[in-house]
Amino acid sequence: MAIFINEKTRVLVQGITGKQGSFHARQMQEFGTQIAAGVAPGAAGATVADVPVYPTVAAACRDHELDASVLFVPAPFARDAALEALAAGIRLVVIISEHIPVHDAMQILAYANAQGATIIGPNTFGIAAPGKAKLGIAPNQIFAPGPVGVVARSGTLTYELVANLRDAGHGASAVVGLGGDRVAGQSFVDVLAKLEEDPETEAILMVGEIGGSAEEEAAEFIKGHVRKPVLAYLAGKSAPPGKRMGHAGAIIERGRGSFAGKVKALNAAGVAVAELPSQVPDLVQTLLTR
């Protein structure tokens, strides 16, 4: 079992003929992902990595049963691409695109909720179930199967932490990138609930950052609903006050969302917070053996 995806997930790649779409389609295949079809307007009849390309999602769905779609579509076209996938009945849509207008993202999420579908992202590195499947852009070589579930707001920091865990002999059961935008399809709480129910997950690593209230909300959820051990690492400890950071979600407003406030909330929920990325493997080992 894994969360969101597994080795049987049949995947559509929207934007598969582009530079990023074609490269990452091949990377996902090498990871073990079942790429069933691709979509690119005007490229009907083409193939990429032996995958047939269709002009629309509806056309792809006529020839294939599809469980999920991953979007490598420029931001101005991402809303229409996501709505097209949802309208075709695809239940999981992973949106890699960044700089999607906030109102476009809100429209996507509202439609997904109405359809009972799940959105991962926008502005996410994707999701991975090591040994089974991957949807997104995370490097294949950082992953190994194991008992640690990882949920994160930051991409490259997550790559470092997951690779450190792999080097220390701790693989991952699932790795989920929430995305760095202010409007995201999944929250820490959503993914924590799934990892708590996942029998392959024995411990959970949260990778958070300053700004917003997602980590504080996660802390409240952990108090009442998570029995598995949780470790957190938060980016932004040394961020200077008033400095604009890279992620849209990393904005401190009216004194909320500070590093100190998030650490206090997580500690109160029984969550240890690593001060350095290098501490994470040893702390995970402690959680797994206690």
Image (tube, rainbow, N blue to C red):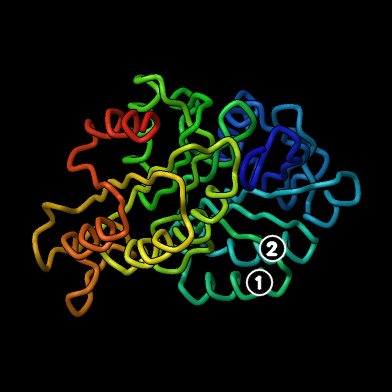
- Report the residue at 54% width, 56% height from top: 193
Q: Amino acid at mark 1?
A: Asn
Image spot of residue 204 (x, y percent): 43, 43
Q: Nearer the viewer, residue 274 or 175?
A: 274
Compared to residue 221, the image places residue 175 above or below, namely: above
Classify residue 107 by image quadrant.
Answer: bottom right
Q: Quadrant of the N terminus?
A: top right
Q: Residue at x 32, y 59 (%)?
A: 269
Disc 2 and disc 1 in contact, CB within 8 angstroms: yes
Say which quarter of the image contains residue 86: bottom right
Give 269 or 124, whichever is nearer the viewer: 269
Up-down: is 20 above or below 98? Answer: above
Q: Quadrant of the C terminus?
A: top left
Q: Which residue is mark 1?
A: 113
Which mark identifies residue 222? none
Q: Of 196 and 49, which appears nearest the observer?
A: 196
In the displayed structure image, the side of residue 124 where residue 235 appears, left or right = left
- Residue 62 x %, y %: 90, 51
Question: Residue at label 2?
Answer: 117
Rendered location of residue 169, percent (x, y): 40, 19
Near mark 1 (Cα within 10 A), the count class, few <14, some 14-19 or many ≥20, is: few
Residue found at the far bottom of this picture = 254
Query: How many numbered marks appear?
Result: 2
Above/below status of 100 relative to 21: below
Q: Where in the figure is residue 55, as x and y percent of width and height?
A: 78, 51
Single out the residue that lies furthest toward the front.
290
**Residue nearest the viewer, comparing 82 with 290:** 290
